[in-house]
Image (cartoon, rainbow, N blue to C red):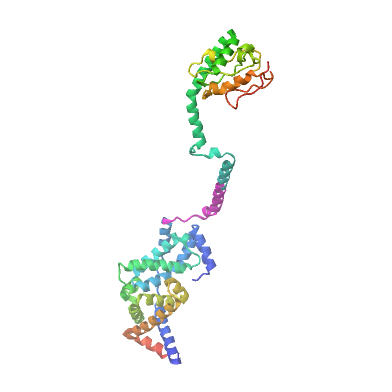
Amino acid sequence: MNPKSRRNKLAEIRLVADSLRSEPIDAPDFTASILSRVDAERAFLAPSVRRTIPWVRLGLLGGVSMLALSAALVLRYAPASADLVERPAPLAAVVRTFKQQADAPLESFRQSVRQTVEETVQSVALAEPSRVLSAAAAAARLPEPAAFVRLSPATFHAEPAPPTSLAGGAGEPVFVGLAAAAPAAPRAENLLLAERPGVPALSVVASARPLLSAETFLGPRLESSVVPPPRSAAFPALLDSGLDERPIVK
Amino acid sequence: MTMTRAEERRLIERAIAGDRAAAAEFIKAHQASLYAYMLRMSGRPEIAEDIVQDAFVRALTNLHRFDFKFRFSTWLFTIAKRLYVNAMQKHKPAYDSDIVGAAQGKLDAPELRTIDGEVAINAKVAIDFALAQLSEDQREIVVLFHQLDWSIAQIAEHMDMPEGTIKSHLHRGRQRMKAALLSHNQYSRHVAEVWAD
């Protein structure tokens, strides 16, 4: 840029600047009107109110923190109380409920069977225990399906049967603690139990479900019982694997 | 009235907190320049007044959204420019010295019908005429740079243009304005004097 063009440019700048600044623009004072409009839309606060705002914020922050802490503690130590809606039941609970509902009628059946068995056992065994054992031995060999019913915690014990009563007199009399009865109508001659107070119980855990046939289940037991076992030997429960196997002590 | 960025920030924080005095300080600091800018841009005092007030109200009620990386003036002028663009869709700019003079309450005053008054009115007419010859961008840049003393960088930020483009617009605007002033009879004597220096 030569001096002349530089001079021209400066003159041009001066001309424009001078022209624009030569005419001062007196702006009206809008302060009052603007402030009133702003105040209407977003109210100004008095100095005293503004001074309290930080404390209010601090208080709110503290309150929220305490609330969060309380919630955390509740969730940590008593999560169940924090459940506002019922949780869906787990599958185990559904199964348990279903089983309970299904067992309800079965339980009433068990009760009736138990009652009948007890009554029958008492009446029959007290009258002729040896005959009961013999009859039961015969019944146990029957190939017909049988249901093993749960006996009540009442103590039943068979009287020692004479050798002739079991296996034609070849074996020693043994205790047989079992019940073989038709589920719907247990018959006295199918019961192998006799009550004798004062003898430790043979607790036979209840089970009303059909297990095995009398022959399958009872036959070998009865046959083995023909072979004299020691008197103090544990007599296996005949119904379930989890049954009481306490030794029968005479 | 100029203020440092730190002062401006403190003032904004006070205004956000609801301090009326801080808001008033902002208005006093910027209303003259914003009004001059709007008057130069629109050529209509009544539009300039409306836009200035609306821009301040919007800025002060939305101060909590202000981004401190900008200058408050840049933000305020941007709001005002948007309002101006909206207003211009309804009204065309009118570079009429009668309107400008009437708005300032001087034209009808009998004492102004003196030689000085006539000269002043002639100058206004010439300036308005020259500004009217510029494009919208050139006019805005010339006003911001030569009248409001904004830097090139600040104008570039405000107009969202590269600094080189701003300089180019400024150069062309000045040339066009000079030609317009020279062509204006009432102002040509002053122009000749400037050139004679």
Q: Is residue B101 above or below residue A111?
A: below
Residue A181 in percent (x, y) is at 52, 18
With B109 as the anchor, is A225 left or right in this view?
right
Q: How many marks overall? A: 0
Residue A191 appears anywhere in the view? no
Chain part drawn in magenta = A41-64
| Quadrant occupied by the C terminus of chain B | bottom left
Q: Is residue A1 above or below residue B70?
A: below
Q: Is residue B36 above or below residue A211?
A: below
Q: Nearer the viewer, residue A233 or B191?
A: A233
Q: Is residue A51 left or right of residue B102?
A: right
Quadrant of res B130 = bottom left
* Residue ranking furthest to the top: A127
Given residues A7 and B168, the one toward you in this image is: B168
Q: Nearer the viewer, residue A148 or A71?
A: A148
Residue A244 placement (x, y as % from top left):
62, 24
| Percent x, y of residue B55 | 40, 64
- Magenta residues: mostly which secondary structure? helix
Does A228 sit left or right of B43 as displayed?
right
